[in-house]
């Protein structure tokens, strides 16, 4: 890990790693590890970071909004830790430029894919927690919250969040997404996703990523359910 890259990471995250090897892992996409024997990808750190991030955002939300009911707290937390919000935060922090990807994945545009940005940011949270403990991890989460889209705006504009709120309020269930087909060459994938509510398909969407296809499916489901055609 070069000193200049360390400086860039420190500016982005507000934290300088004591263990540069840990930072290397946090910035290593599985495609890079597959092309370089003996290299570890960020998957395990992503697992840890997801849990640390969820805990810290929940703690922050609980303390910041005393007296609010559980449902409102859940929505506030979700507006920060939802995949698209984390991807936008990662983009604002310049994470994409720091990642190590395999040649094929990089050429296919994986560097700017929402799911990659989300996973990398979670891995970095896990790495900061392991390297420095809870205090710097908390400081990083504050940066993430500041960089993420406003909670109210996100909830209003994100069809997946709106669909989840609707299905939980009306039927006490969560929507389930399923990729039904993947077409096209690696650099121009087209995903088709169905979303089901209580086991019944309520919407279908197509997009260049699973996330965009899920959003399209959620939009279709919202139109069907709010129009009455999907009443359970």
Image (cartoon, rainbow, N blue to C red):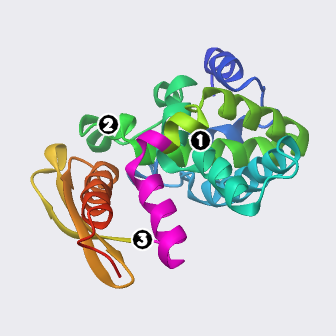
Q: Residue at x 60, y 38 (%)?
A: 151
On residue 89, the disc is none
Residue under label 2, please give it. Answer: 106
Q: Secondary structure at mark 2?
A: helix
- Residue linked to disc 3: 175
Q: Which residues are magenta?
A: 156-175
- Label 1 to label 2: alpha-carbon separation: 17 Å
Identify the element where label 3 is drawn.
loop
Vertical placement of residue 29 versus 200, above or below? above
Q: Is residue 5 visible?
A: yes
Q: Position of residue 232 (x, y in %)?
A: 35, 82
Task: Tell me the distance, in whole angstroms, between the alpha carbons under discs 3 and 1.
Answer: 25 Å
Residue 163 covered by magenta stretch: yes
Q: Is residue 92 left or right of residue 182?
A: right
Looking at the rendered image, the quarter that the N terminus falls into is top right
Is 70 or 99 nearer to us in this picture?
Answer: 70
Please state the horizontal and vertical placement of residue 157, each as a whole percent of the image. 42, 40
Q: Is residue 117 visible?
A: no
Q: Is 60 left or right of 118, judged from the image as shown?
A: right
Disc 1 crowd, CA 10 A, few/some/many (<14, 14-19, 20+): many
Mark 3 surroundings: few (<14), some (14-19) or many (≥20) residues within 10 A = many
């Amino acid at each position: 890990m070069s000193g200049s890259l360390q400086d860039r990471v420190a500016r982005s995250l507000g934290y300088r790693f004591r263990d540069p090897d840990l930072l290397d892992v946090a910035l290593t996409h599985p495609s890079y590890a597959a092309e370089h024997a003996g290299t570890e990808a960020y998957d395990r750190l992503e697992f840890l970071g997801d849990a640390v991030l969820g805990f810290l955002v929940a703690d922050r939300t609980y303390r910041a909004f005393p007296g609010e009911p559980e449902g409102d707290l859940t929505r506030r937390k979700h507006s920060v830790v939802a995949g698209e919000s984390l991807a936008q935060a990662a983009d604002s922090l310049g994470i994409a430029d720091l990642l190590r990807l395999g040649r094929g994945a990089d050429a296919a545009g994986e560097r700017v894919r929402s799911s990659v940005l989300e996973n990398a940011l979670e891995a970095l949270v896990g790495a900061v927690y392991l390297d420095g403990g809870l205090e710097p991890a908390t400081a990083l989460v504050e940066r993430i919250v500041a960089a993420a889209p406003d909670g109210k705006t996100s909830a209003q504009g994100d069809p997946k969040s709106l669909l989840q709120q609707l299905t939980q309020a009306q039927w006490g269930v969560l929507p389930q997404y399923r990729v039904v087909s993947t077409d096209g060459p690696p650099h121009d994938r087209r995903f088709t996703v169905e979303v089901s509510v209580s086991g019944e398909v309520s919407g279908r969407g197509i997009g260049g990523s699973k996330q965009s296809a899920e959003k399209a499916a959620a939009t279709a489901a919202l139109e069907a359910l709010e129009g009455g055609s999907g009443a359970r």
